[in-house]
Amino acid sequence: MAYSEKTPEHLSSVSVDPMEMESFSRMAADWWDPSGPFKPLHIMNGSRLEFIRDTLCEHFHRDPKASKPLKGLRLLDIGCGGGLLCEPMARMGANVTGVDALEKSLKTAKTHAEQVGVEVKYIHGTVEQLIESGENPFDAVLNMEVIEHVVSPHDFISDCAKLVRPGGLMITSTINRSFKAFAFAIVGAEYILRWLPRGTHQYDKLVKPREMQRYLKDAGLIAEPSVGMTLNPLTNKWAISDDLGINYLTVGKFLN
């Protein structure tokens, strides 16, 4: 599948936003810099990985304490960027495919994976291109911190769901469209702490939990109750919580 030879403008409908792509293009080389523009994701990764592992293990009846708890599962990471989630998922035994519309990010991801000796299949392209190519559905689809950057969230989730096999699931993560999120995730992270470049997130494009639930249900998935993610400013660590005010995760499942 030569996605690098096919650009989004060849498609009748695409999820990527050109302005968002331009912003991430400027940061592509910094994905694996823990002090760079993707610092928030590095800090968040421990909590995200634990949630993903435990969710997949519970769903597919695996032992989360096993050395390779996800062995044999086909996993797709949409908007994989530099591979911050792909690599640890592969280390847990999953057969991981990462797709991203930004070629610069994928070059960083491929180079890093080769350097550390982790096998991940990276594809330059979009969700729509994967579907058009006839890609086989996956056991699980990761949709993490992506929906707030796409053109049409509803259509994006609908397309992503087409890549989940019967009996599989999709895990989503994003930022709530709330005053609290505006204050902390945009003003705080981008303008005060400068963890992210200004303009990385646009308030109007953030998604409320009830909207995410509706998108998943409209796509034919059974949406589980959303759970929050909270940052402890003293320890600088994230934890799963009941607070949906800023970051939250939602799992959608397909019946067999």
Image (tube, helix red, strand yellow):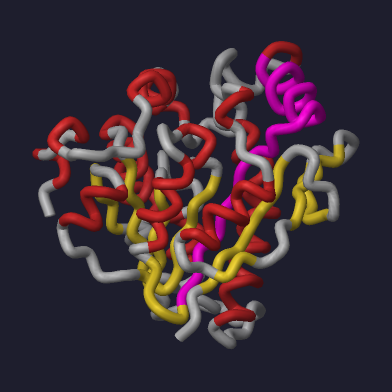
Please state which of residues 34 and 242 is positioned toward the viewer in this rendering: 242
Q: Position of residue 240 (x, y in %)?
A: 78, 55
* Residue for point 15% across, 58% down: 133
Q: Position of residue 203 (x, y in %)?
A: 63, 24
The image quarter containing residue 10 is top left
* Residue for point 17% across, 34% down: 7
Q: Position of residue 111 (x, y in %)?
A: 31, 42
Q: Is residue 5 above or below residue 141?
A: above
Q: Is residue 225 left or right of residue 144?
A: right
| Residue 30 counted in the magenta span | no
The image quarter containing residue 132 is bottom left
* Residue for point 37% across, 44% down: 112
* Residue for point 24% across, 55% down: 130
Magenta span: 168-190
Q: Is residue 219 left or right of residue 44?
A: left
Q: Position of residue 113 (x, y in %)?
A: 36, 50
Q: Is residue 124 left or right of residue 166?
A: left
The image quarter containing residue 200 is top right
Q: Is residue 66 left or right of residue 247?
A: left
Q: Is residue 166 above or below residue 79?
A: below
Please state which of residues 120 and 114 is positioned toward the viewer in this rendering: 120
The quadrant the N terminus occupies is bottom left
